[in-house]
């Protein structure tokens, strides 16, 4: 049976876009951007590159009636982590909690409302790094922008800062479109967690979660950005993460996909600071009719930079996955070390995955490698475990968890496996990670590897 063609024009109207702009008091510059991006939303394809249009897996998306102005009650939340800066997005709005110690040290957080009322330079700084959308869903994310903030950590503040952002979808036809602009000043140490969930109540129709992150790292700054994506099967999600590295800075992008209906992830990192190191680590677990579409783009500009992108996915039932990694090494980016590794495991005949690594090397004095595979579970490994008294389904599960642990073992957060494995086990058992008291699925207090034993955070580059 042919898949019905989505009626994009029914998702959101021009009149609704104008009402959003007025309700949020858009500055003139963004009011025009919102209108322009709505036109792009109507005109652009889902996938701009014709080579990849057969791999996007964005069928059956129908966001008819999504409402960025829809309101609802505030969701219950667990007690805050001591000393942490917390941001909560839900149908009631955005709540920001900043400890007085951080505020006194010069750490600032300005909400979207405050930014829209600031001078034009402040608006421009908030939007810096955003590019003109090249696909329909990115244009939709910009059109529906309704949440945001600017976080700035001053130069020289070297105490570790934990930021916990919770986004909870809780009402029908909800649209959370969030823009976060983050500057980690020189020698700053930042551990940021973006946690996305939904309440267990049944909903009518699909919902939108759009996440845009711009991250600037100062000299010798260190940042870990961990995303837990676990909404229900009504969520259509669009992620756009961009980073610019400073000299001798360290960054770890970490993304764990366990929920959602259709999910698109776009990571872009520019190595503009000499000696900077970036790890982009992603895991996906897909079941039923979920699909994930991930793209990692590394651009090495400065000398002596190291970057590794490691993506692993496990897919069963009718789930789909696609990953592509592009490494571009510019002419002057000498002594670059780069790795792209994309592997997927299929646990059923109906599952499918594609991986596309790309290297574009314009400099001779570099080391760049890539690896990729898509394959079912190795029957010899299953037989080995069965011969030792482990049942077939449990053997497959152990192999799948071990396959994903290759990525989790490289995450520079203490005891992250012990924290994440119970959540992965729940998904494997068919349970959702619904947001409901008292057992909230939010992450606990975390520390970056080496924080307790030394004042400097330790990043193990582990390039292979």
Image (spheres, rainbow, N blue to C red):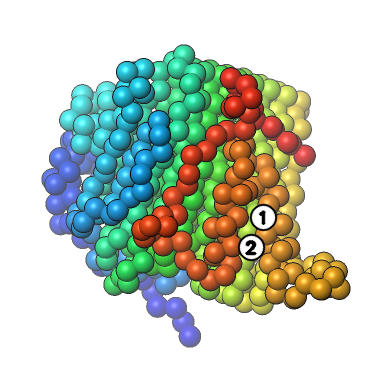
Residue 71 at x, y percent in the picture: 19, 56
Instruction: Specify whether residue 14 is in view.
Output: no
Question: Position of 251 compared to 107: left or right?
Answer: right
Q: Which residue is drawn at 50% across and 68% down?
A: 431
Residue 446 at x, y percent in the picture: 52, 38
Q: Residue at x 40, y 18 (%)?
A: 154
Quadrant where the image shows the C terminus = top right
Residue 225 at x, y percent in the picture: 50, 38
Q: Are marks 1 and 2 in contact (CB under 8 Å)?
A: yes
Most foreground residue, 300 or 374: 374
SS under mark 2 = strand
Q: Pick out the residue farthest to the bottom.
A: 1
Q: Is residue 296 above or below residue 250?
A: below
SS under mark 1 = helix
Label 1: few (<14), some or many (≥20) within 10 Å? many
Q: Compute the Cα span from label 1 to label 2.
A: 8 Å
Q: Is residue 9 above or below residue 28?
A: below
Most foreground residue, 245 or 197: 197
Q: Residue at x 54, y 58 (%)?
A: 423
Read off the residue under disc 1: 404
Read off the residue under disc 2: 314
Residue 348 at x, y percent in the picture: 66, 75
């Amino acid at each position: 049976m042919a898949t019905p063609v989505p009626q994009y024009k029914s998702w959101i109207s021009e009149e609704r876009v104008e009402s959003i702009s007025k309700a949020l008091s858009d500055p003139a510059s963004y009011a025009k951007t919102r209108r322009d991006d709505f036109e792009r939303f109507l005109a652009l394809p889902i996938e701009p590159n014709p080579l990849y249009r057969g791999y996007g897996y964005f069928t059956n998306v129908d966001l008819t009636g999504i409402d960025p102005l829809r309101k609802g009650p505030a969701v219950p939340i667990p007690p805050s982590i001591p000393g942490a800066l917390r941001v909560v997005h839900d149908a009631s709005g955005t709540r920001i909690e900043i400890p007085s110690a951080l505020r006194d040290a010069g750490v600032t957080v300005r909400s979207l409302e405050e930014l829209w009322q600031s001078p034009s330079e402040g608006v421009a700084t908030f939007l810096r790094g955003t590019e003109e959308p090249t696909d329909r869903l990115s244009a939709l994310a910009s059109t529906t922008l309704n949440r945001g903030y600017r976080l700035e950590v001053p130069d020289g503040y070297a105490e570790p800062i934990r930021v916990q952002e919770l986004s909870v979808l809780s009402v029908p036809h909800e649209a959370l479109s969030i823009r976060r602009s983050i500057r980690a000043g020189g020698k700053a140490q930042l551990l940021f967690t973006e946690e996305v969930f939904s309440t267990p109540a049944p909903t009518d129709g699909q919902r939108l979660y759009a996440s845009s992150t711009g991250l600037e790292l100062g000299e010798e700054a260190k940042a870990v950005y961990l995303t837990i994506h676990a909404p229900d099967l009504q969520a259509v999600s669009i992620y756009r993460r961009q980073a610019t590295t400073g000299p001798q800075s360290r960054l770890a992008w970490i993304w764990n996909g366990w929920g959602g209906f259709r999910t698109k992830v776009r990571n872009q990192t520019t190595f503009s600071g000499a000696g900077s190191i970036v790890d982009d680590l992603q895991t996906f677990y897909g079941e039923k009719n979920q699909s994930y579409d991930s793209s990692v783009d590394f651009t090495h500009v400065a000398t002596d930079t190291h970057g590794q992108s490691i993506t692993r996915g496990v897919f069963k039932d009718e789930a789909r996955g696609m990953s592509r990694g592009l490494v571009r090494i510019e002419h002057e980016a000498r002594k670059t070390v780069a790795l792209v590794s994309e592997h997927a495991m299929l646990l059923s005949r109906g599952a499918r995955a594609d991986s596309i690594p790309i290297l574009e090397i314009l400099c001779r004095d570099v080391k760049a490698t890539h690896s990729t595979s898509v394959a079912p579970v190795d029957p010899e490994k299953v037989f080995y475990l069965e011969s030792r008294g482990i049942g077939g389904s449990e053997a497959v599960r152990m192999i799948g968890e071990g396959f994903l642990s290759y990525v989790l073992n490289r995450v520079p957060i203490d005891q992250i496996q012990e924290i994440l494995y119970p959540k992965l086990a729940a998904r494997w058992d068919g349970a959702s990670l619904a947001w409901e008291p008292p057992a909230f699925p939010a992450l606990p207090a975390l520390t970056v590897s080496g924080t307790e034993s030394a004042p400097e955070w330790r990043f193990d580059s582990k390039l292979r």
